Structure formats: structure tokens, C-alpha cells
């Protein structure tokens, strides 16, 4: 048996820091971000500097405030994206029918975002790595016409990662089936966008770590400007209800919805919906004109005022940290 470990030997799981930012959590209900989760960025820096004293070589090297960054890519919402609490704060929950609930994440309830703790177990090792005080700064959802959604989750973390062996973190089995392209719908002002080829939803909270004099690690975090956007590409069709050029030329705001739903009914229904409001058409482009081997397509890039997210799931109490 080879002793070399490949990427497939490593897992990525998370819990909510329910006992305070960068504090050991009580939560041991390990959750996953999605299918094929990859920790693309796991960087840490002591921001060390050299101190000189009339010589070419340093007399000393000192560390400054710790700086950590992470980014995760994954495919699909194979597990309900409870991590949205790290972007919005805890949701408002409404019983739809039976055991089915809508959990709506927005900024209107003034709940604070929740920090996460990432766990990185490696098959064959009794120890696992821990990324403490992880906060989400941006999320991107990419949807193509022949695939499920691809997600990128990026942010920072508070202090040096470390190893532990007291728990047994592992990625749980997926709670949901994968969404495919036919489970997705893009609407503009309530009208389905025909021949939509791709969408990119970006949510930037610009969250930053907060330090203080006398502390080597971050002591808190704060979300900054809220900057959502949704870009999409579509093929021009006869009798289309969404005229991209008109949207751009009118230069008026509109609303878009990116909806994923498994098409089931009653308690078996599972959905993830993003409602984007106040979209302003910032940039327009067309491609393929008079090219016999291409589709005639239009692209629209927007800047939006706000976005809400709703998870429809047969769970009454979403995990997270009560405000």
C-alpha cells in the first residue's frame, strides 16, 4: 500500500462557531459544502519583516498580524447550503406545508454573519487540520446549459491553523440528489429566459478581519459593502420575451431569479432560489453575427442592489447560530 496521499484522500467539512468567533465550537455536526469539494486556497502568513541594524543581513525577523485566506470550489447543492449563514446570518423560517419549510436568508433581519470552522481530515491519519475563525467574503454560482451549478466560496480565517485528534470529522453522505441543468430556471421580471446558455451570480460581502493593538490574531470580523451581480448569456430567438438589448438600452432596473428545484412535491421537494433585485444593466455584448458556425448570442452584465436566498427543505430548524 503506498504511503503517499493524493488529493482524494483529504476531506473538507465545516461546523459553525457557535461559542463565539475563533472559539472552539460545541457544534460537531459536520457538514459539507457540496459535491466534489476542493480546497483551492489554504494560505497563511505571519507577514514577517526583517529588522536591520547597519548591516546587509537582518538583525532580527519579527512576525506581524496573522493573515489567512481560503477558497473552496464545489459542484451542486448536494447538501443544503446552510453555509449561507456565513454570508447572511441566520434565516427566517416559514412552514410551507407538512414538514416542508422555506428558510430565507437576507439582510433585512439584521442578523450577523456566522463564522465557520473548517476541518481537514486525511485518510490514514489520526490527526486532522483545523482552520479556525473562517469567514465568507464572496460567493459565486456559475450555471451552464449542460451542467449543474458550480460554486466558489472565498474568505479569510483568523489565526494559525493547527492539528487535533479529539474528534472524528468526516464528510457525511449527501442529503440531496444533484441538480442538473434542467432543474434550473432563470427569470427576468417574472419571464423565463428562453435559450439561456449561462449565468454567473456573484455575491460580494467584502468581509474583513479586525485586529487590535496587542493581538497577533484577528479579534473580530465585519462585513463591508454588499455587492451582488448577475450576468447571463442567451441565444436570440424569434418572439423572445426577454430582449437583452432593450433591457440595456432602457437603462432601467429590473429583477432576476435563479431557481433550482427538484420538481418533487410535498415533503420531497428540495429547492435553492436566489432572488436578485435592483439589477442595473451595466454592460452588453453580442457575438456570432454572420458567423455560420456560431449561435447569435447576447450577454448582459448587471450590478444589483440586493439578493436573497431561500432553501426549501423538509427541515424545521436550520443549523447555525441563533441571533
Image: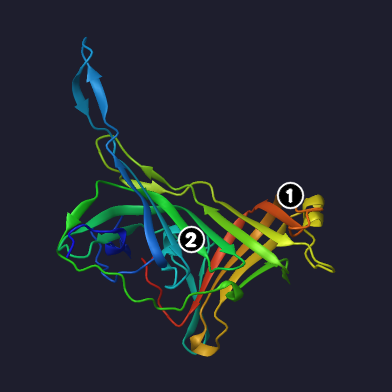
**Image location (x, y in percent) of residue 74:** 43, 62
Whether 161 is drawn above or below 50: the answer is below
- Horizontally, is 316 left or right of 288 in the view? left
Q: Which secondary structure, mark 2?
A: strand
Whether 233 is drawn above or below 220: the answer is below
The residue at the point 77 percent across, 52 percent down is 248
Could you tell me if residue 50 is visible in this image?
yes
Q: Quadrant of the C terminus?
A: bottom left
**Image location (x, y in percent) of residue 59:** 18, 19
Earlier residue among tags 2 and 1: 2
Real-space CA distance between mark 2 and mark 1, rounded to the nearest whole angstrom: 25 Å
Could you tell me if residue 22 is visible in this image?
no
Q: How many marks?
A: 2
- Horizontally, is 234 left or right of 33 in the view? right
Q: Residue under circle 1?
A: 285
Q: Residue under circle 2?
A: 151
Task: Bin the neighbour count of mark 2 within 10 Å (Cα to Cα): few under 14, some 14-19, many 20 and up.
Answer: many
- The colour scheme is rainbow
**Image location (x, y in percent) of residue 141:** 53, 60
The residue at the point 74 percent across, 56 percent down is 298
Whether 102 is drawn above or below 164: the answer is below
**Image location (x, y in percent) of residue 104:** 52, 70
Residue placed most toward the observer, 307 or 125: 125
Residue placed most toward the observer, 208 or 73: 73
Task: Bin the neighbour count of mark 1 within 10 Å (Cα to Cα): few under 14, some 14-19, many 20 and up.
Answer: few
Residue placed most toward the observer, 133 or 191: 191
Q: Which secondary structure, mark 1?
A: strand
The residue at the point 53 percent across, 63 percent down is 106
Amino acid at each position: 500500500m503506498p504511503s503517499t496521499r493524493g488529493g482524494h484522500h483529504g476531506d473538507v467539512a465545516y461546523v459553525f462557531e457557535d461559542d463565539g468567533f475563533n472559539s472552539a465550537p460545541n457544534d460537531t455536526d459536520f457538514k459539507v459544502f457540496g459535491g466534489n469539494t476542493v480546497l483551492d486556497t489554504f494560505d497563511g502568513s505571519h507577514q514577517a519583516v526583517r529588522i536591520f541594524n547597519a548591516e546587509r543581513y537582518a538583525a532580527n525577523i519579527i512576525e506581524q498580524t496573522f493573515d489567512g485566506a481560503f477558497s473552496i470550489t464545489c459542484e451542486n447543492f448536494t447538501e443544503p447550503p446552510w453555509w449561507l449563514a456565513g454570508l447572511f446570518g441566520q434565516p427566517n423560517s416559514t412552514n410551507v406545508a407538512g414538514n416542508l419549510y422555506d428558510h430565507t436568508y437576507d439582510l433585512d433581519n439584521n442578523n450577523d454573519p456566522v463564522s465557520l470552522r473548517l476541518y481537514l481530515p486525511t485518510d490514514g491519519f489520526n490527526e486532522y487540520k483545523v482552520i479556525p475563525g473562517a469567514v465568507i467574503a464572496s460567493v459565486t454560482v456559475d450555471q451552464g446549459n449542460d451542467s449543474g451549478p458550480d460554486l466558489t466560496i472565498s474568505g479569510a480565517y483568523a489565526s494559525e491553523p493547527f492539528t487535533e485528534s479529539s474528534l472524528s470529522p468526516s464528510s457525511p453522505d449527501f442529503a440531496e440528489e444533484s441538480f442538473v441543468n434542467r432543474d434550473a430556471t432563470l427569470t427576468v421580471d417574472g419571464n423565463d429566459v428562453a435559450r439561456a446558455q449561462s449565468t454567473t451570480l456573484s455575491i460580494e460581502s467584502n468581509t474583513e478581519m479586525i485586529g487590535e493593538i496587542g493581538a497577533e490574531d484577528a479579534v473580530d470580523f465585519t462585513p463591508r459593502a454588499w455587492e451582488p451581480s448577475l450576468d447571463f448569456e442567451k441565444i436570440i430567438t424569434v418572439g423572445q420575451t426577454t430582449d437583452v438589448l432593450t433591457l440595456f438600452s432602457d437603462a432601467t432596473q429590473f429583477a432576476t431569479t435563479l431557481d433550482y428545484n427538484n420538481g418533487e412535491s410535498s415533503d420531497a421537494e428540495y429547492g435553492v432560489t436566489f432572488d436578485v433585485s435592483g439589477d442595473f444593466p451595466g454592460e452588453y455584448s453580442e457575438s456570432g453575427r454572420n458567423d455560420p458556425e456560431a449561435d447569435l448570442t447576447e450577454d448582459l452584465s448587471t450590478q444589483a442592489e440586493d439578493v436573497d436566498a431561500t432553501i426549501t427543505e423538509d427541515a424545521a430548524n436550520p443549523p447555525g447560530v441563533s441571533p
